[in-house]
Amino acid sequence: MRLLLIEDDAPLAEALTAFLRGKGFVVDTAATLAQARAALPAAHWGALLLDLHLPDGDGLSLLPLLQRHYPDCSVIILTARDQITDRIRGLDAGADDYLVKPFDPDELLARLRAVERRRGSGGGQHGAVLQLGNLAIDLARDRVLLDGQPVELTAKEWALLRVMASRPERIHSRDSLLDALYGFDDDTDSNTLEVFISKLRRKIGRERIQTLRGLGYRLAGQTP
């Protein structure tokens, strides 16, 4: 899942970015509302991590724009404001979740996993483990099991598999999968995605990833 972190505290932004990238997320950053507005049309964002107190205004002022033009993008507010009234105001404005600084990065990770599960179930509740025959993809524990044995994946391979596993019924376009792999500052080759797809197939089985010519890729073999 690709994230936009909107945070003007540079050390905190760097620490969170490093942590989340280490967990397989693609993270881009913005330090102001103006930078965030410029970044929004440039990618398919799975979630925004939004600070409220920004140099050029209140982060909540961004939410009406998101609701109008990016309704599929989830919002987790990260703020030092710890009053109940502030939390209510943020949630009433359309945020999906709220974390008060300082927070444990693992708690943020758990909230993001919950976002992925909701997105994958169309807003309903379902388990964090996707079972594809003898392949189990555990989104909550960041692990993959084949015939009960762990499959070792690189961060990029896991990021690619996770975006497909979070919405297994969907055909994922090439552009949407590239968004899950690379941020604004990353260099990509024209065949990079195909290389990662090939590596994943070797590890989890060629039949697990379908190619739909001209459309994209989809996971196959989900157990009812």
Image: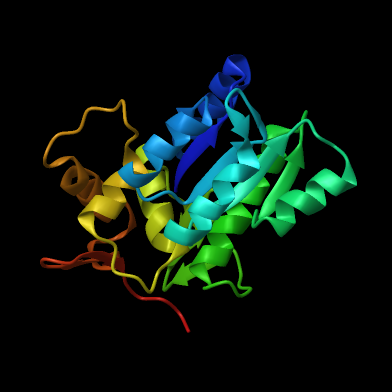
Q: What residue appears at the point 47 percent right and 54 percent down from the top-left corner?
A: 144
Q: What residue appears at the point 74 percent right and 41 percent down from the top-left corner?
A: 99
**Residue 23 shows in the view:** no
**Residue reaching furthest to the bottom:** 224
Q: Position of residue 73 (x, y in %)?
A: 49, 55
The image shows residue 6, relative to residue 15, as above or below, that is below
Q: What residue appears at the point 63 percent right and 73 percent down from the top-left corner?
A: 125
Q: In this image, 148 relative to 39: left or right?
A: right
The image shows residue 45, relative to residue 125, as above or below, that is above
Q: Where is residue 146 in the image (x, y as percent from the top left)?
A: 43, 59
Foreground: 58 or 25? 58
Q: What residue appears at the point 34 percent right and 46 percent down from the top-left corner?
A: 41
Q: Where is residue 158 in the image (x, y as percent from the top left)?
A: 41, 46
Foreground: 148 or 163? 163
**Residue 111 shows in the view:** yes
**Residue reaching furthest to the top:** 11
Q: Position of residue 197 (x, y in %)?
A: 23, 51
Foreground: 23 or 174? 174
Foreground: 157 or 38? 38
The image shows residue 193, relative to residue 69, as above or below, that is above
Number of numbered markers = 0
